[in-house]
Image (tube, rainbow, N blue to C red):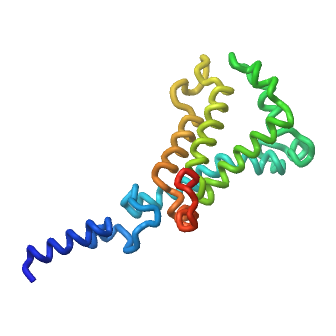
Amino acid sequence: MSQATAATNRSARSTSTGTDPSDTDTPTTAPVTGERVVTSAAARGALAVLRIAISFVFLWPVLDKTLGLGYATPSERAWLNGGSPTTGYLSSLEGPLSGPFVEMAGPATDWLFMLGMGLTGLALLLGVGTRVAAVSGTLLMALLWVTTWPLAAGSNNPVVDDHVVTALVVIVVALTRAGETFGLGRVAARVGVPGWMR
């Protein structure tokens, strides 16, 4: 076989499988979801670790406020002991939009906040539902950004604060399919979960 024919065959195999056999950084099995968004195995691993780390930004407040672990919430103010996860925070707000948020404090807000944070964090931790988590996580971070009102004089950074960074991270996690590495993203694809839910 001539070198030209061998090169043509390699090119045809590469086109049909979507992978280059000489690319040692690409696994031999093609991903279930079709085209690979991030082709570097190291980058996919880093994004998965980032996904797991950011999940605890959402999960930790739920655990601490529910159980009163003694970090931000003492045991006597735990949700399980009759405390409110949101009333203390909302009643202490001082920004220009504090009025409506103070009036929102109550059991319904407690449940919405805890479910939103908990389910967003769980989706990110497990790597399934990351697109839904990107929407809910961004919405939660936007609401928290408004309540802290970093545009006021004396804030640490009026341009980008931790709420903005967290929202951007969950969006990147969803767009790069970071749930397919160290997560259940591929399993969800195999069982036919629609793409928008993965």
Q: Is residue 62 above or below residue 179?
A: above
The number of numbered discs placed on residues in the rendered structure image is: 0
Nearer to me, 148 or 31: 31
**Residue at (57%, 63%) from the top-left corner?**
188
Q: Position of residue 177 (x, y in %)?
A: 48, 55
Q: Is residue 128 above or below residue 92?
A: below
Q: Most extreme residue toward the bottom, as rendered?
A: 1
In the figure, is residue 120 to the left or right of 76? left
**Residue at (80%, 35%) from the top-left corner?**
109
Picture quarter containing residue 128? bottom right
Q: Is residue 157 above or below residue 69?
A: above
**Residue at (9%, 77%) from the top-left corner?**
3
In the figure, is residue 92 to the left or right of 38? right
Q: Position of residue 44 (x, y in %)?
A: 44, 59
Q: Position of residue 34 (x, y in %)?
A: 41, 62
Q: Quadrant of the C terminus?
A: bottom right
**Residue at (62%, 42%) from the top-left corner?**
137
Q: Quadrant of the N terminus?
A: bottom left
Q: Is residue 162 above or below residue 196?
A: above
Nearer to me, 91 or 109: 109
Q: Position of residue 125 (x, y in %)?
A: 62, 57
Nearer to me, 140 or 7: 7
